Amino acid sequence: MSAKILVVGHRNPDNDSISAAVGYAHLKNALAARDGEAGVEYVPARLGPLPVESAWMLERNNIPEPVLIDNVNPVERDGEEVKQQVILVDHNEIAQAAPGIENAEVVEVIDHHRIADISTANPILFLNLPIGSTATIVTLQFRQTGIEMPDSIAMVLLSAILTDTVIMKSPTCTPVDVEQVNFLADKLGLSAVDFGMEIFRTRGGERTMPIAKLVEADSKEFKVSDDVTVLIAQRETVDLPTVMGREAEIREHMRKLVDDNGYEFALLMATDILAEGSQFIVEGDTARVNRVFDIECCEGGNWMPGVLSRKKQVAAPILAS
Ligand SMILES: [Mn+2]
């Protein structure tokens, strides 16, 4: 019976954990075939539900979902209990790993996070680079080993680099990530930025999502003084026109939040991660926002170029006002 080696990302998996597992298992199986390593199979696995964009990517490319597991406890092979062999991708921290990891045999780690607390009895391949995504490292490994990368795998890996680096806008994105994005996009004959936006749109559902979710999913109250509380919400989007198309509903909901909770004002930052700025939509008493940002809050919203951080660029000046 062949040994199954699980290739698994972290708990509560994101697109990088799923895609890196799929891509790296493919690479390892191809290497095993090329090098005549018999009796071993690399199986992509996951520790939780598929993110929407991963489900869409896998389906579009006819790739089976990684197998859902809830532990890496010892397994039976040829009548004996043996340690489950695992390759960790996108994590190297026990708290983020499968239950039972202490009793498993970690045979490789491919990651881009801080070095944490996984330990092994034997020397292993531990490949950790301070770059934007694990999928970037998997892409580099394909290129280094000369293993042919099917277009389906290329698309899955590209999707993961783009989600992990927020379409290359994240401060974690490096020139190495950009190079691999260009390599994969060229191979597939598509525009990386357009493709990235398509992926983020599958995540959004902003056209149809309940208005309360759109406004409140990422909202925080701030106490400006003993008797003044404000609400600052943020919606990060790649489709600002769709969000703004619902402005009337958004404002109505925000007025209700102001009335129900006694806020001085409610401010929604509709943050366009590509254009790198935020549209401010404010309801309630707008005087403080007008004064702090030197604007005149209006219908249609106010475009605030370069404003991406609620904490540093919005809450801080309001709290200091
Ligand atoms: Mn990652």
Image (cartoon, helix red, strand yellow):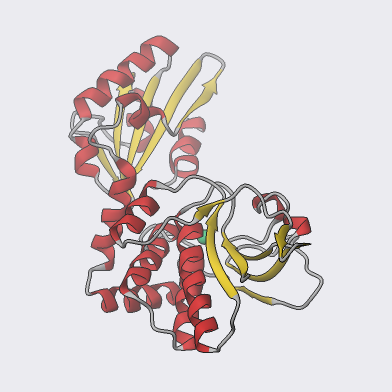
- Residue 269 placement (x, y as % from top left): 35, 37
The residue lying toward the viewer, choosing from 286 and 64, is 64
Q: Quadrant of residue 88?
A: bottom right
* Residue 58 left/right relative to 193: right
Residue 76 position, x and y percent, is 72, 59
Task: Say which of 318 and 198 sits in front.
Answer: 198
Left or right side of 170 for 227: right
Q: Do we see residue 162 in this rendering?
A: yes
Asked which quadrant contains residue 298, the reply is top left
* Left or right: residue 182 compared with residue 246: right
108 with respect to 176 (left or right): right
- Check the image and report above or below for 84 versus 147: above
What residue is drawn where x is 27% and y is 55%? 197
Q: As drawn, which residue projects farthest toward the front?
A: 79
Indicate whether 124 appears above or below 36: above
199 versus 259 height, above or below = below
Q: Residue at x 57, y 66 (%)?
A: 112
Report the residue at 48% width, 52% height from top.
14
Give how far across and how far down residue 93 sits, in percent: 69, 57
Residue 206: quadrant of the picture? top left
Is residue 275 visible to the viewer in this orientation of the structure?
A: no
Count every numbered label the image shows and give the total.
Answer: 0
Residue farthest right in this picture: 121
Indicate the quadrant containing the N terminus: top left, top right, bottom left or bottom right.
bottom right
Q: Position of residue 264 (x, y in %)?
A: 41, 18
